Amino acid sequence: MNDTIGRTLDGVGPRLKQLRQRREITLTDLAEETGISASTLSRLEAGLRRPTLEQLLPLARAYGVTLDELVDAPPTGDPRVNLRPIRSGDGSTILPLTRRPGGIQAYKFILPAGRDDTEPDLRTHEGYDWAFVLNGRLRLVLGEHDLVLEPGEAVEFDTRTPHWFGATSSGPVEFLSLVGKQGERAHVRAAPKRRGTA
């Protein structure tokens, strides 16, 4: 097998694990959705087994990505990011804004109008999140805090803290999210003050 192809297939496992964790689903749930056993999925994610086309097709379909994106096909020289929206059954849309595995990942979330009495389903996972509200009002439940963020507001937190995002009844919300591994943080730097200004 060509070395380039071998290296490409060896890199699929971490991407598969990252996509599954991003969707916050278990191997058992993914097995039901794809028809691939949980043990095979686990071996694929761990890099103990190279994927076949018969396995990659249902996985790409389940994650809402192209095969090129799933296997990180060599670049064609076109720098544009191919935005492939991932739509959920609840009406929300996720736009992945980065394509490379590892490091900080960027997403744009669009959530439909919610209900103010929605009982949040708090989740935890390894990593660090930074979110910035573009439009609408974003409800964030973070541990014991229940916050509503307005456009232009940002939040940064350790994702091991139980958390949940949702829109309010005032309408849909759009926000950016940068998610990194534990210890990686998104840093926002303010411009230095100009001389003569207070």
Image (cartoon, rainbow, N blue to C red):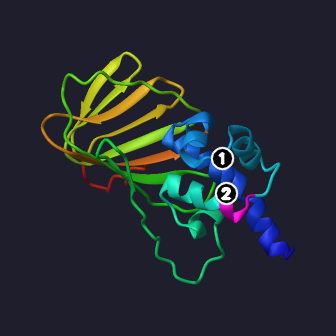
User: Is residue 185 visible to us here?
Assistant: no
- Image coordinates for residue 81, horizontal then vertical, percent: 47, 70
- Image coordinates for residue 23, horizontal then vertical, percent: 49, 42
Number of the label disc, if any, that sits on residue 36? 1
- Image coordinates for residue 95, horizontal then vertical, percent: 40, 57
Residue in the foreground of this view, choosing between 60 and 147: 60
Whole-Å distance between the Cαs marked 1 and 2?
Answer: 7 Å
Range drawn in magenta: 51-55
Q: Looking at this rendering, what residue extends furthest in the top direction?
A: 144
Mark 2 Cα within 10 Å, few/some/many (few <14, many 20+)?
some
Q: In the picture shown, does residue 102 fall above or below 153?
A: below
Q: Which residue is mark 2?
A: 55
Per the picture, the main secondary structure of the magenta-coloured stretch is helix
Residue 130 on the magenta span: no
Which residue: 38% across, 43% down?
131
Determine whether label 1 and label 2 are within 8 Å by CB. Answer: yes
Mark 1 Cα within 10 Å, few/some/many (few <14, many 20+)?
some
Q: In the picture shown, does residue 22 fall above or below 86?
A: above
User: Is residue 25 visible to us here?
Assistant: yes
